Amino acid sequence: MTAARREKIEEALFPPVVAILIAFVAGDIIMLSFNQSPFVVWRLLLEGTWGNAYGFGQVLYKATTLSFTGMAVAFAYRAGLFNIGGEGQLAAGGLAAALVGFALPVGFPALLAILLGCLGAAAAGGVVGAVPGYLRVRFGAHEVITTIMLNFIVLALLNWFIATRLRVPETLHTPEIHAGAIARLSAVLPAFHGSAANLSVIAVLLTAIAMWYYMFRTRGGYELRAVGLQPDAAEYGGISVGRVLFSAMTVSGVIAGLGGINFVLGYKYYYEDGFAGGTGFLGIAVALVGRNNPFGILLAALFFATLSQGGLAVNAFVPKQMVDVLQGIVIIAIAASVPEVQRILLGSRRRPVTTSALDSQPAATEPPAAAV
Amino acid sequence: MNTFAIVTQVLRIAVPYLFAAAGGVIAERSGVISLTLEGYMLGGAFAAVVGTFYSGSPVVGALCGIGGGAVLALIHAVASIRYRADQVIVGIAVNLFAIGITRVFLKLMFGSSSNSPRVDGFATGYGDPLLWLGLLSTPIVAFILFRTVFGLRVRATGEKPEAAASVGVPVHRIQYMAVLLSGALAALGGVYLALDQHQFTDQMTAGRGFIAVAAVIFGRWSPLRAGAACLLFAAAETVQIHLQGNHVIASQFIEMIPYVLTIVALAGVVGRAIAPAALGRGET
């Protein structure tokens, strides 16, 4: 292993490890304040998640949606864009998947129905992602604000649609889909019985592989990262920055929207108002901890899903909301330690800037600050 | 319902927005992105109820609320200014942290996962000192920003930190003060909400902090325009309350107004939205 490579790995691993250690200490303090032994609670948390097939299935289920929203954030971030609209894109994707499954007749070939449902989810998410992309390129409207505002607008629209048009009376969800449910994992491995884990995990793996290949092995991916690192240089090098930004935002929305299949096609078989429940926002954390690398994101999603499911497992001892606190602490610590760690590493070793910089993060110290 | 009552209602709805937007303007003018207003409000609301519960005095409660908002602002400031963390990411995390920590303490102190016991509040309506302070927060912040040395330094820091530093302005200290002040101001918005309802309920701010962010941008970082945007949004909400059940316009569409207007503003339809030049850079 070369020194440069080792340094890169150190740089990628150090911030998450520090952040998780800080969260571990904070968790201890919370547990002690509830008069519980941290040793007992942490053990319970692990036993309730990775310790049995049901718990692990739940972790997998939660990690699936988180991976989608995390990859969505990372894809945009590689182009230097912040997509905070994952929440709205995910919800829109979920509703579209449900509408497709609902509109198709009973007896429609299941595999085809699933594909159509995935397409619908991707298309809906893509449309919601394309709007801030267009506004950014055409009017220079900063995507951080437009995506946040669009979250509220999209969620209100979907809520209106469900409340007034298509729902089971006395509920806030659509009727069940007729065709094209994604099989539960328990159909393949009976040990997972009862857990929500389903074969959407395959879609996640395929998306991660496709995203990695696109970003690091294709011309389009090179352009994406070039724009994220140095838009001016990219423009000068003949890359159409506006086109890259617009498509990055759209694809980001597509990935987030695809996340809707996990809940709708794989778990509940209907769209329910509020199912996104913060998963879109948590995708920002997942992307950050996963260092914007598709495979790093899968691991980060497993970590956050473990916390989330683990919170339920220990709820009798400490409130499950403890994990919200820990998540917040992890994000703050990692966001704070990334520039700091880079400063220390760069400061002490004065690494020369080479083209290999394209493999690392976009220049985070200089975000498109224009109009936040 | 007479005009007077309607005006009162608009003002009462506007107060939390006015406080938070006033705080947002100060922080953003110093160059620090304040997507954290929601978290400050929530922290302020919770601390105010705890303070009032244990002391029996809403004045003590309000002071606790300011403290709660300031603690969250300090986290945001240290991460953003000292460690130059990405302010957008930290902002989202501070909000998440505020939701979590208020829930944990709600459970720890009051044994409930949804709401606190009832506490005393200030007099309602025009007797509430926070109502007046809220209405005054906009002109006060305008005065601070445009008529004091501190305000001049805040604006210089947000526009051109290098230039400010070169003439001896302690850039980081100014940013710390601006962010702490924004935390305290936004927290008062939460205090008003909580004491007006005489209790804390889980996630009671319900997106109001983000509406305040919208108001800051729609008001193009001017305190008076941001305050006017808050009144506009509050008026829309009042209209919605009075139309409820009429089905003239679905409430969901009224809810969208602040957000749609902000996007319209950002797209330059009502004049270019020009942010402080150094916003989000987190460096000098």
Image: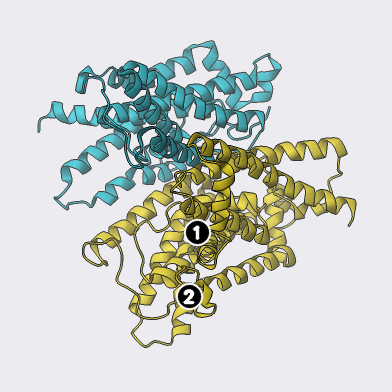
* Image spot of residue A168 (x, y percent): 25, 67
- Where does label 2 land, which residue? A184
- Where does label 1 land, which residue? A130
* Residue A246 in view (yes/no): no
* Image spot of residue B139 (x, y percent): 38, 18
For mark 2, give the secondary structure: loop
Which colour style is shown? Answer: by chain
Give, as a three-letter code, the residue at label 2: Arg
Q: Label 1: chain?
A: A
Report how far apart the C-alphas of labels 2 and 1 lie in the structure.
Answer: 32 Å
* Residue A29 in view (yes/no): yes
**Residue A59 left/right relative to B165:** left
**Residue A79 left/right relative to B204:** right
The chain letter of the yellow chain reads A
At x 33%, y 84%, the residue is A105
Give, as a three-letter code, the residue at label 1: Ala
Give above or below for A175 relative to A104.
Answer: above
Dot 2 crowding, Cα within 10 Å, few <14, some 14–19, many 20+: many
* Image spot of residue A176 (x, y percent): 32, 73
Q: Nearer the viewer, residue B272 or A157?
A: A157
* Image spot of residue B89 (x, y percent): 57, 42
From the image, which quarter does the N terminus of chain A lie in? bottom right
Q: Which is in the foreground here, disc 2 or disc 1?
A: 2
Give above or below for A243 relative to B8.
Answer: below
Q: Colour of chain B?
A: cyan
